[in-house]
Amino acid sequence: MTSCGILRFAIACSWICLAHTASAQVSLVGMVRIPGTESDKSGLDGILETGTPQNALGGFSAIEYAGEKERYFVLSDRGAGDGAASFSCRFHEIDFSARGGKTSSSFTLVRTTLLRTRAGDCFKGGLAPIREWDGTGHPPSLDPEGIRYASGDRLVISDEYGPSLDFFGRDGTLLDSVPVPEHFRLSEKRTPPMTRGTFSNRGIEGISLTPNGGCLVAAMQGPLVQDGRIENNKCLGLATRWLVYDLRGGPPKEWLYLLDDESTGVSEVLAIDDQRFLALERDSKSGSKAKIKRIHFVDASRATDVSDVPSLREGIPSGHRALDKRLLIDLMSPEYGLSGEATPEKPEGMAWGPSPREGQRLLVICFDNDFMPEQDSILMAFLVDEAYWNR
């Protein structure tokens, strides 16, 4: 690993006045763009199979506050080319300031940490080993999608390939794994395949720890095969499941989250408390073709456990209830500057930052540039009035 020296980028920043609001409860206070040509601090050199530098900075799939000053963890995903590269999986520590009323902001890359097995080998993001995998044990590659900071200086990271949930040390070493229920196992690895389980590239995308650290919530990007239908090599449907783990023990519960549209998926979930969350839902289009990039407030107080429901394909069984949700932020609202041809495809991660004042929360969002050098990685910061979910 390289030294922890500070790298500062000259970044074009856009600050939006507090008067520019989507509602009385939400204000965009800052946006920072990081060029897709920047390098990280992995210390790696050379070029990957996709022509991408080994040390390219990008692919921001998740963000998490580190609990001190303006320090955040940012997780890169499996690398360029949708799994075509033997990219070494990694996370970064950054300093990101977002103070309303300022005319500029700062982004500082502090360090890059590679994710490693217990034996010390780097986890790779390549899809080829997954194709040869028999579906048992820990997946040989990772597609990291979610990151949260847990007690004991540990990080919990979700992987979409397995899907899997793993605890890593802050040094990047795998420590332990959380068992994923059998009916969530990768569908293409079953006999017969595509009858139940996780559809490829629609696995665990968003994760969150409740504020007391006792509950881990893991949100599937899309429907399980048994909850949707296969058309044109896609698993379509509105019913997605969230796994809800009590980290003190016992089997997880499952909550039902209904997507806005079959074209969308859940990219992230963020806990407000034990019963209330934010969910980032988006389609997979950019520019004028994009339709949905939304953050919903989600209430679990009336949701029922659907872990005993073998299939949700025909709807919600009698006696069960889905999570309640309502719109908080439409990221494509024109005042945010990301509408029309300027709409990026992938808002991917959410984190709470240090609260600026009582009654408000700082919400930070990261956008994935897919390691494309011509595309910027983006960080956005919103002030959210807690009165929105306390009304």
Image: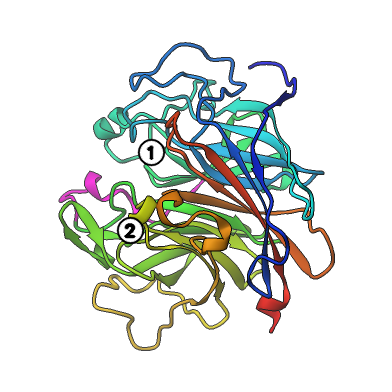
Residue at horizontal 43 percent and vertical 70 percent from the top: 257
Q: Are marks 1 and 2 in contact (CB under 8 Å)?
A: no
Range of residues picked out in magenta: 178-194
Q: Amino acid at mark 1?
A: Gly
Question: Farthest residue in the top direction?
Answer: 46
The reply to whether residue 251 is visible in this rendering is no
How is the rendered protein coloured?
rainbow
Residue at horizontal 54 percent and vertical 28 percent from the top: 57
Q: Nearer the viewer, residue 297 or 174?
A: 297
Q: Which residue is mark 2?
A: 183
Q: Position of residue 360 (x, y in %)?
A: 77, 66
The reply to whether residue 294 is visible in this rendering is yes
Quarter of the rendering containing residue 131: top left
Sequence-wise, the earlier of marks 1 and 2 is: 1
Left or right of residue 273: residue 250: left
Q: Nearer the viewer, residue 203 or 95?
A: 95
Q: Which residue is mark 1?
A: 137
Above or below residue 18? Residue 201 is above
Residue at horizontal 66 percent and vertical 66 percent from the top: 272
Disc 1, SS: loop
Disc 2, SS: helix
Q: Position of residue 296 (x, y in %)?
A: 53, 69
Whether residue 15 appears in magenta in the rendering, the answer is no
Q: Quadrant of the C terminus?
A: bottom right
Whether residue 183 appears in magenta in the rendering, the answer is yes
